[in-house]
Amino acid sequence: MPVLTYQSIRSFLDYLKFEKRYSVHTLTSYQTDLIDFIDYLETRFGAVSLKEVNHNYIRSWLAQLKSKGLTAKSINRKISTLKSFFKYHLRTGSITSTPMVNVISPKISRRLPVFVKEEDTGKIINTLSQSSDNWESLNAKMLIRIFYATGMRLSELINLREKQIDFSKSQIKVLGKGNKERIIPVSKDTIKIIRDYQQLKKRDFKETEDFLLVTPKGKKLYPKYAYLLVNRVLGEAGTLTKKSPHVLRHTFATHLMNNGADLNAVKELLGHTSLAATQVYTHNTIEKLKDVHKKSHPKA
């Protein structure tokens, strides 16, 4: 791989890390995409400098990815990586034009988000409320309740610190993608279960980190532990095609929309940068209206 290419990737990743404050997970994804792209160029076309990369090289790489069975969504993510990469180098003066202007993203068939029905959500929460007070049950209860009450991402919840919770105002300050802060109001019930959880932490552990959620050993909750707990609870509750924490984020947004919430308000609560990302939840609302119409209208 040419030295210039190594340097161009490194400077771009440093920019994302130190100026844009992107997460480690996002940085790893960008780095993987870029190294895969450069490796392909070197294997297929030989040593190519940054200025020599054109849209034909990029299209060739994308065609290879498609032939390997990558979905349109995965390919679009890689296109997004390249767009950001070349935009950065255009801004720094390393190149005078970006090859991405002639690269068209494949269309994605948008699937409706999987979510838990309102009546089923109530049953899950009631069941968890009656569960035992061992730490696995407590964490399952906290994860389900807070995910559903706030629509947080998994990374946002496991990194949630106690100081981000304003008990007097019943709200939580969430640090989202790109270190963007947003405020999410929560119910008094949610505040109460958080307080109860804090008291149990003080009782059972002499010392814990400032993170709200902890493992049975008093350490910061980690993604796989949280994922498996949510997966188990949702698996026991029904026949969802997906049983991940993100399903609860979808559930939060869908229930808000189905009960008349403003689309822009839902966008802010979810921490979306674009309204287009939030509009997918209007489809679920329309499906609900169709169902009501079909059941209620005499000529439906």
Image (tube, rainbow, N blue to C red):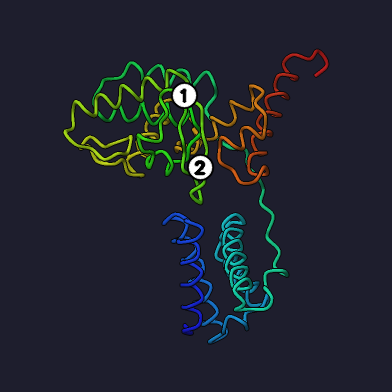
Answer few, some or many: residues within 10 Å of disc 1's Cα (few below 14, many 20 plus, some between 14 and 19): few
> In terms of image quadrants, where is residue 290?
top right
Dot 2 alpha-carbon crowd within 10 angstroms: few under 14, some 14 to 19, many 20 or more: few
Residue 39 in percent (x, y) is at 49, 77
Residue that label 1 marks: 169
The spot of residue 7 in percent (x, y) is 47, 78
* Image quarter of the C terminus: top right
Q: Residue 222, located in which quarter of the rendered image?
A: top left
Residue under label 2, please give it: 181
Q: Residue furthest front?
A: 168
Tell whether 175 sits left or right of 208: right
Residue 291: image x %, image y %? 70, 22
Query: Hey, which quadrant is residue 88 in on the image?
Result: bottom right
Q: Residue at x 66, y 35 (%)?
A: 264
Q: Is residue 32 left or right of residue 277?
A: left
Residue 58 % position (x, y): 63, 73
Q: Secondary structure at mark 1?
A: loop
Q: Is residue 176 above or below residue 240?
A: below
Residue type, label 2: Glu
- The amino acid beneath tag 1 is Lys
Farthest residue to the bottom: give it: 46
Q: Which residue sits at x=39%, y=39%? A: 160
Residue shown at 63% from the left, 21% from the top: 259
> Front-most of 33 and 270?
270
Residues under numbered marks 2 and 1 in contact, where contact means CB atoms less than 8 Å apart: no
| Sequence-first disc among 2 and 1 | 1
